[in-house]
Image (spheres, rainbow, N blue to C red):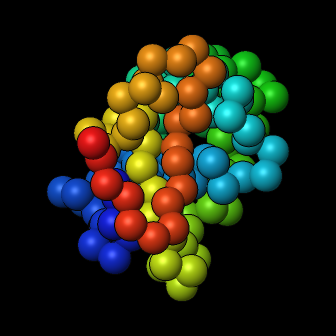
Amino acid sequence: MNDTSNLGMIGGMTSQGEIILSLNSHPKIGSQTLKKVLNVYPDAIELGHESEAGLRLKLGEKIAELVIEARKTYLPEKELERLNKQNIGYMTLYDKEYPALLKQISDNPAILYVKGDYKTE
């Protein structure tokens, strides 16, 4: 699970989890839209570096505008701070702690929020 107390920049780059967290924080980016974005950009770090023109070309105008707005408005450090204040952690599809059974379903969430202890079995 991503422990929000020790997440940060990795080699000057935001992590995949932080990019997914930022996108998921946008009220108009739901689970299905987030999955569409991740299907086009399976490496979320690439999404973080893509130009606005590239986003529009690959995602279409409507989704690209939401992603651009999320990148400008929902900064990872602010979202992490918000979660820290509430003692909430998160995990994404890319984390080893993500529940194996959830990975098997076709409509699985890209991100899970966790409050309290979570133990993988």
**From the viewer's perspective, is 62 left or right of 67?**
right
Please report the residue visible at 58 percent of the width from the left and 34 percent of the height from the top: 109
**Image: 83 above or below 120:** below
The residue furthest front is 121
Q: Position of residue 114 (x, y in %)?
A: 49, 60
Q: Position of residue 117 (x, y in %)?
A: 38, 66
Q: Is residue 94 visible?
A: yes
Q: Position of residue 78 (x, y in %)?
A: 55, 74
Q: The N terminus is located in which quarter?
A: bottom left
Please report the residue visible at 51 percent of the width from the left and 68 percent of the height from the top: 115
Please report the residue visible at 66 percent of the width from the left and 41 percent of the height from the top: 67
Asked whether 64 or 37 is in front, the reply is 37
The residue furthest left is 11
**From the viewer's perspective, is 81 left or right of 58?**
left
**From the viewer's perspective, is 65 left or right of 78?**
right
Asked whether 60 or 100 is in front, the reply is 100
**Image: 48 above or below 61:** below
The number of numbered badges drawn on the structure is 0
Please report the residue visible at 23 percent of the width from the left and 57 percent of the height from the top: 10
Q: Position of residue 42 (x, y in %)?
A: 42, 24
Q: Is residue 50 visible?
A: no
**Image: 103 above or below 22:** above
Q: The C terminus is located in which quarter?
A: top left
**Image: 17 above or below 63:** below
